Image: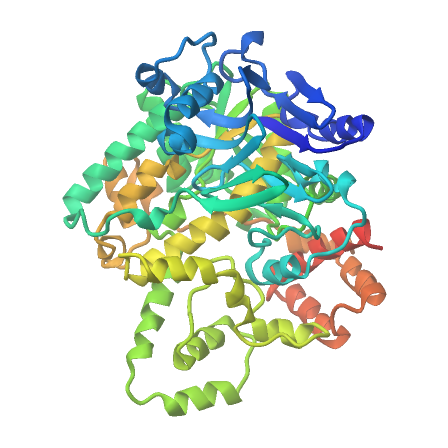
Amino acid sequence: MCAIFGILGQYNENLAKNALAKLAHRGPDYCGIVQNERLFFAHHRLSIQDSHHRSHQPLKHKNILLSFNGEIYNFNELKQELEYEFKTQGDTEVIIAAYLKWGVSFVSHLQGMFAIALLDGDTLYLFRDRLGKKPLYYLNADSFVFASEIKALVPFLKKVQMDEDALLSYLSFLAPTPPYTFFQDIKTLAAGEYGVYKDNTLNIQRYYDILSTKVNIITSKEEAVSKIEQALEESMELRLHSEASTASLLSGGIDSATINYYAKKQGLNLPTYTLGYKEFAKYDERENAKTTADFLGISNTAVEIDEAAFIQASDRVLDTMDQPLNDPAVVPLYLLFEKIKADGHKVVLSGEGSDELFLGYRQYFEYLDIESAGNLLHKNWLKKYFRANFSNNREWEWYKRIFDETLLFRTSGESFSDLQKNDLMKRNVKDNASLKYLRKYRERFINSEHTDESIWYSYIDLNIFQAEHFLTKLDRVSMAHSIESRTPFLDHKLVETVFSLDPKLRYEDGVTKVLLKNVMRGKLDEKILQRKKKGFANPYMEYLINSKRIQLIKEVNKETGLFRERVLDEYILGASRGAFKQHIWGLYVLSYWIKKNLL
């Protein structure tokens, strides 16, 4: 893992170096800079493969400059195909060699996670990996500036202003949707996109789409399980190669148990880490994690946090994120990585992506069931009834959409509906306005060969709920501690394997993650396979209320007038009773950002 940073055009050297320094946590092992009058091209390095100085970046070959953040897991295989005199043992040089052979299409040969900045003469290419594991932000103003994190671009803004599309998409989907960020004029590449900057013009294109995968190639459950097992094992094998000390997260669930099973199978007893919460047993995973660790014969370290630790770390964590992200798990995860860092590890394996691939959320099955209500021939009365009897309950919103014949599923991370936003905000928010942020994804789905709505669920969740929410959280939290996070379930070949199945194989039994459970049956204890999903739950709302930090929402609202006070009070009261908790956390994080950046 590393940080990439660059400027094309005029710049102030002190400003550029100070901005670059804001990314030092991503790569504390070396900082490299190539600069001239109209170019500042830089890199912070976290050494994982080939720590020798020969692999320092930016890497130069003739008129090509490369700054790369990530890991190319198949670089040794690619070396066999490339006619190039390699001078290093790492993966970075392979990118240059691949570009020289295949041009821009070299990216389709890479297996891994990456954000790439490649300057060829006067043309700059920026790539974000297929599934959005690594971030890449840019600012196209007087000069063109790009970076791995927003904090390095903010110093180049003439004025900090909040982007309205970022705000509205954040309230809807827990994170701003590409290309928007909360800082007006700072944009992000989406997963699977690349940009070409030349002659002061930026052109954004898509080089990868999961929906290009042929559907219904695999129709039998036995073959599906076999293909998934093969792809998963290959993904694990690639991600276990590291010259740096590696650890793994371990909850009580099947995802982390699967990762550690395959690590053990390949001869690695990875140290594992689990979170626990003092005085809140209902959120605690320590007992289940210990049972899994004992079954696999691996070590497990439990990290206990309490309210004081959570509150003390929260401001530091929210600053790390740069912009609002509605995920209360970010604070305990930050503290967990803090312990992993203290124990000397530089690589961590994590289970992101499994739920989206294998339908691990129970609500997927609820949505599939509700979809069928759209086939009712006589539904006009129901349509009128739902329009006339508003409710804040999410089930009301689901049925209204079906009877209105509009899009039902809008990511697993949907928070405020448009009608809720209209009720809460001092502005007119039209119903279905948030579909604007999903339109390009929905159009690609409709124009693809895929027709089963469950594929849409996985597709939009991988692009938004995962890439912009979970993977953004994982990247910032791990890199804040100079740790590389690896996600074996998000290997693009494994993802394509799942998308090539007859979709019904994932849900016809009515069992969450049925295919993954079948893969792991006989490998893991049946108790692990049957455990009820707990997620990364934590007592954030109890902490927020007990510490009185929740008052920040009302304090900021008095200064901004963004929300109707009566409705805001209703949400806060509801959160104290266990309802709309994530809505309130999202408003708290938003209030923190507004106070820091705008007030």
Give the side of residue 368 with respect to residue 153, left or right: left
Of the pair 45 and 552, the residue shown nearer to us: 45
Q: Name the residue: 76% across, 26% down.
A: 17
Q: Quadrant of the C terminus?
A: bottom right
- Who's the residue at 42% across and 87% down the image? 383
The number of callouts visible is 0
* Quarter occupied by residue 587: bottom right
Report the residue at 58% width, 48% height from top.
538
Image quarter where the N terminus lies is top right
- Residue 296 in sight in this render: no
Residue 144 at what x, y percent from top left? 67, 38
Relative placement, left or right, of 340 versus 192 is: right
Q: How is the image coloured?
A: rainbow
Name the quadrant containing residue 402.
bottom left
Residue 583: x %, y % from top left: 62, 62
Residue 593 seen: yes
Judge from the rendering whether residue 508 lies leftward or rightward of residue 122; answer left or right: left
Name, please, the residue furthest toward the front.
Answer: 199
Q: Nearer the viewer, residue 290 or 256?
A: 256
- Where does the image place residue 37, in percent across and percent down from the top left? 74, 24
Residue 428 vertical placement versus 195 (above, below): below
On screen, residue 109 above or below 356: above
- In the image, taking residue 320 as reference, residue 53 lies left or right, namely left
The answer to which of 201 and 462 lies nearer the viewer is: 201
Quarter-of-image position of residue 516 = top left
> What residue lies at 32% left-to-right and 36% top-to-bottom?
493
